[in-house]
C-alpha cells in the first residue's frame, strides 16, 4: 500500500511538471501571437496616417497653386488698368496743355477779326486818295497801314498774299472767275478781300477770283 502511494505521488509529480512546462510554452506562444498582431495593427495604422497626411499636403499644394494663378491674373489685370490710366492721364494732360496754349494764342481772335476790318478801311482810303491825286493823304494813310500791319505781324496776325498762287479751300473763298489772260488756269487771278491768319490759323478767308481758260 505504501509502495503504491509512493508511485502515485511520483506519477502525479511528473504529470504536474509536464503540465507546468506545457503551460509555460503555451503562454509564450499566445503572448508572441498577440504582440505580432499588435505590431501589424500599428503598422497598418501608421501607413493609413501617412497616406492621409500626404493627401492633405497634396490638396494644400494644389490650393496654393490655384490661388497663385488667380493672384497673377489679378496682378496682370491691375497692371493693364494702371497703364491705361497713365496713358489716359497723359492724353488729358496734353489736351489740356494744348487748350491752354490755344487760349493764349487765339484768345484775341475775335478782336483781330474786328481789327482787320479797320485795316480794310485804311487800305481803301489809300487807294481812293491815290486815285484822286491826294498824295499827302495817301502817304499818311499808307504809312498808317504799314504801321498797323507791323503790329499785326508782331502779334501773329498776318495778311495772306495768295495772288497767282494755288487755290486752297481752307484759306480762300471763290467769289468770281476771270479769264486767264496768260495766268495759269485754276490759279488765283484777283483778290477782292484780303484774308488773314492768326498764328497760322485762318480767321478770315481771302475772297478771290480764279483764272479760267476762255473758249474761242
Image (tube, rainbow, N blue to C red):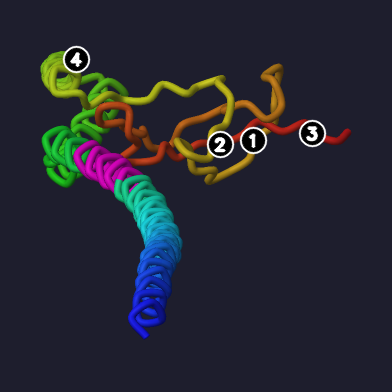
Q: Determine whether the residue tagged by mark 2 lies in a helix, strand or loop.
A: strand
Determine the image quadrant of residue 20: bottom left
Observer able to see residue 153: yes
The N terminus sits in image quarter: bottom left
Name the foreground residue: 190 vs 113: 113
Name the residue carrying label 1: 178
Q: How crowded is mark 2: few (under 14 residues within 10 Å), some or many (20 or more)?
A: many
65 is higher (above) or lower (below) than 18: above
- What's the mark number on residue 152? none
Q: Earlier in the sequence, mark 3 or mark 2?
A: 2
Q: Name the residue under label 4.
A: 135
In the displayed orientation, state which residue is furthest to the right. Answer: 216
Q: Tell me what residue is drawn at x 43 percent, y 60 percent.
A: 36
Residue stretch rendered in magenta on the structure: 79-95
What is the CA distance from the residue labelled 3 to the residue labelled 1? 9 Å
Q: How many marks?
A: 4
Q: Earlier in the sequence, mark 3 or mark 1?
A: 1
Q: Nearer the viewer, mark 1 or mark 4?
A: 1
Query: Could you give the CA–CA distance between mark 4 and mark 3, rounded to whole angstroms?
Result: 39 Å
Q: Which of marks 3 and 2 is in front?
A: 2
Question: Please, which residue is most extreme toward the bottom here?
Answer: 1
Residue drawn at the location 35% of the way across and 53% of the way down: 64
- Magenta region, mostly helix, strand or loop? helix
Amino acid at each position: 500500500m505504501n509502495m503504491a502511494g509512493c508511485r502515485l505521488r511520483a506519477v502525479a509529480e511528473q504529470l504536474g511538471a509536464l503540465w507546468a512546462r506545457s503551460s509555460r510554452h503555451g503562454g509564450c506562444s499566445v503572448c508572441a501571437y498577440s504582440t505580432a498582431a499588435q505590431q501589424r495593427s500599428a503598422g497598418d495604422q501608421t501607413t493609413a496616417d501617412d497616406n492621409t497626411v500626404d493627401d492633405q499636403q497634396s490638396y494644400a499644394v494644389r490650393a496654393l497653386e490655384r490661388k497663385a494663378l488667380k493672384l497673377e491674373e489679378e496682378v496682370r489685370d491691375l497692371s493693364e488698368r494702371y497703364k491705361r490710366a497713365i496713358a489716359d492721364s497723359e492724353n488729358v494732360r496734353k489736351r489740356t496743355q494744348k487748350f491752354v496754349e490755344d487760349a493764349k494764342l487765339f484768345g484775341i481772335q475775335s478782336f483781330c477779326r474786328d481789327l482787320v476790318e479797320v485795316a480794310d478801311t485804311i487800305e481803301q482810303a489809300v487807294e481812293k486818295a491815290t486815285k484822286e491825286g491826294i498824295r499827302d493823304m495817301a502817304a499818311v494813310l499808307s504809312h498808317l497801314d504799314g504801321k498797323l500791319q507791323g503790329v499785326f505781324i508782331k502779334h501773329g496776325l498776318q495778311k495772306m498774299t495768295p495772288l497767282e498762287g494755288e487755290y486752297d479751300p481752307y484759306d480762300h473763298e471763290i467769289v468770281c472767275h476771270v479769264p486767264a489772260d496768260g495766268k495759269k488756269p485754276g490759279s488765283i487771278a484777283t483778290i477782292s478781300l484780303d484774308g488773314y491768319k492768326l498764328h497760322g490759323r485762318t480767321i478770315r478767308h481771302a475772297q478771290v477770283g480764279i483764272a479760267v481758260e476762255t473758249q474761242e
